[in-house]
Image (cartoon, grey):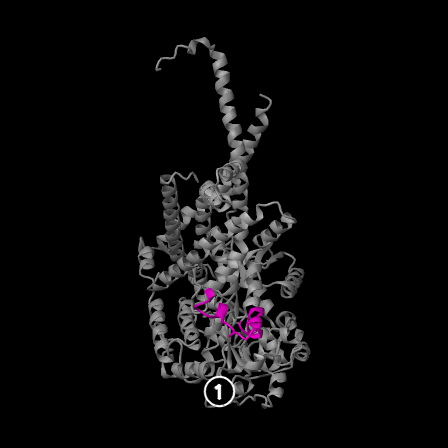
Amino acid sequence: MQSIRPSRLLAAGLVTALAVALTGCSGGSGTATVDPKAKTTIVWWTGQADQAQKILVGLAADFEKQHPNVTVKVSSGAPSTEDLLQKLSASFAGGTYPDVSYAFGSWTSQLEASNRTLDITKQVADPKVDWKDFSAAARQTARPTGRRTIGFPAVVDDLALLYNKTLFDAAHVPYPTADWTWDDFRVAAKKLTNPATSTYGYGYSVSGSEETTWQFWPHLWQNGGEILSSDGRTAAFDSPAGVNALTLLRDMARTDRSVYLDQTDTKFGQLFVANHIGMITSGPWELYDLKTGRTKYGVTAMPGTNGDHETVSGPDVWTLFDHKDANRAYWAYQFTKWLTDPKQDIAWNVQYGNLPLRPSETSSPEFQAQVKALPGLDIMAANLANSKHARPTVPAYNKVSEAIGKQISAVLQGQGDPATALKAAAKQADSALAGNGP
Amino acid sequence: MTAVPTAPAVPADRRRAIRRRGAARALEGWAFVGPATVLVLGLSIFPAAWSFLLSLQRWDGFSDPVNVGAGNYAYAVSDADLWAAVWHTGLYALLFVPSSVLLGLLLAVALNRRIRFVGLYRTAIFVPFVASAAATGILSTYLFSPQFGLLNTILRDLGLPPQGWLEDPKQAMVVIALMSLWGSAAFTTVIFLAALQDIPAELVEAALIDGATKRQAFRHVVVPQLAPVIAFATIWQTVEALQLFDLVYTTTRGGPLNATQTVVYYLWNAAFKQTEFGYGSAVAWGLFAITMLITVGVIVVSRRARIEAF
């Protein structure tokens, strides 16, 4: 019998462990009225890593110091920002979602549809928040359907034209200017191209992902086109404006052979750094690599059509989630408001090398110091004024994006013509927007 | 044998003790298999059952799920992109399975001799298998890069036209098959090597004494002995081939022009990029059914042929 007792213990222990595991953590019952003095813990998923994460952890500690009754449990939330969406979905199923999470702008309508987000429309109307100071695209993304404000802008960026001075000098081509047209751009790209040295004038992603798609939107908008109809129910990009825009890219890629067609989304940036591509359209995140690679580069606004130099912006959002607990909701809001105030935003976005969330920050000495370290950042910040349209925030946007991204890459790789391709993409997008499909 | 008159021979209290000991034994047994059972139930059976329920729903991970019955399966049947993915996967299996089995057999025979440094050769063959597919994929994109890769540089030096490799829709799948062959030939080699060493040397010797040539002895003595292992390796590699994902993810992401979009890549994209978890689950169950059919089919055939692989 002696040998049996330990195993019984083991079995009993196992059953207990199982029971504990299966009951899991069920959320505590929240309070209905706010008590700002109560001990409160909020969970914050930043979606950041390395240096960025270090800055945010420091800011959370600062906030805790100012409000000793509040604990901010801060973590990245997921191994990469892209994985956050999946992690959020899983955390909803398990009931362990955070109070504040980073979210890509393209996710916001889905997150709102979960009915687990807070609505802070009334709070942000307070003049102290200075909500209007955020760029229009950023504000629109935080209000995906226009009914609720689900969070604060977290990071803003935009596409600008980056040119490689080494290659321009070698080909004796004058540098791009802020009033370039796409024709100027095309001519320069062709002059820069040299098959013997594997040098290309321009780089464009043909992976068919959002990288392919969003690079196309400025072309479409500048030609007077729209992505969706005004009611958001049908695709509108298969217009003459869309065909014009895609024809330009097709002619550059097929006729001039001046475009490096990147299958991976990541190589064209590296090749630009390594002096193999003369021009790319990219954002602030590229500047750090250019500094590390010691590339001689310049930055200017996107080439334009009829004087219109519109660009595209990809704002991300600090989304606030509802735990039916007034104290947690109160502090989640207070914390995010504090985080996006100019002072803290300088400590975070500006120090890290992102664009400032608020134009007022550009005059700060911190931003001026960053501009010295990362030349062109000021031009990209000013370029936010050229971002007039927001990317659609309909739930089916990712499907619309895939439908057109696939067709753009096919046309650039020599399959099909712009008009037919856009028509096919629009048909698929319409079906997705109507809620058909799987 | 219905009436067993031995029962009264054991005293009642002893019988109780035996029964108690039996119960204790059972408990002890469960304690040993318990953790593993919980793991299997929790990490395999439960997710599988849940994904089946999901496959009957339309769910984006956030909004309330909508029951669609067999709708996802019906959509899958009419989904041209999915069929393209099935075709790409089939092409890959056709390229990969026979060549990996043949190459494994060849390498195993070559390594099954008393030659100098055989340990070194065996290790060298096995190293790529240990390397992760991610590393293999990323390294080979550099090797195969059309503009800057080593292979095209060699072709250019030889005066041959450079190739598009992974950026050419016609060649991409072949390149991926080559890459995975490099990575996984070691697996079949090791299996065949073990099987070869199990074949008694006397059998081959006897055949040789009876006047068979070396080739005949290999063909008629060694190969039949290997048949069960060949059947096993074929099934295993087929299942592996149908689940190709990691190499595609690290090299082409399904491109160029979807030429390397495999079924698993397609379902991953549907579930996690398009957040159509229901549809992704339905495709996964379809793939499971096909894999199951192939496996059962091969088992039945090999049983009929009296190859005892399973």
From this view, report whether residue B171 is shown above or below residue A252. above
Camera sees residue A129: no
What count of labels does the image hold? 1
Chain containing the residue with disc 1 = A
Q: Nearer the viewer, residue B63 or A247?
A: A247
Q: Is residue B255 left or right of residue B290?
A: right
According to the image, label 1 marks what residue?
A182
Amino acid type, callout 1: Trp
Start-end of magenta stretch: B146-172
The quadrant where residue B232 appears: top left
| Residue A108 percent across, percent down from the top left | 47, 66
Residue B137 drawn above or below residue B300: below
Q: Residue at x 56, y 89 (%)?
A: A177
Nearest to the observer: residue B177 or residue B210: B210
Closer to the camera, A264 or B211? Answer: B211
Q: Secondary structure at mark 1?
A: helix
Q: Residue furthest front?
A: B211
Mark 1: give few (<14), some (14-19) or many (20+) Cα within 10 Å.
some
Q: Is residue B199 above or below residue B157?
A: above
Residue A298 in the image, given as x and y percentages of width and height: 61, 83
Q: Which residue is farthest top?
A: B9
Is residue B164 one of those drawn in magenta? yes
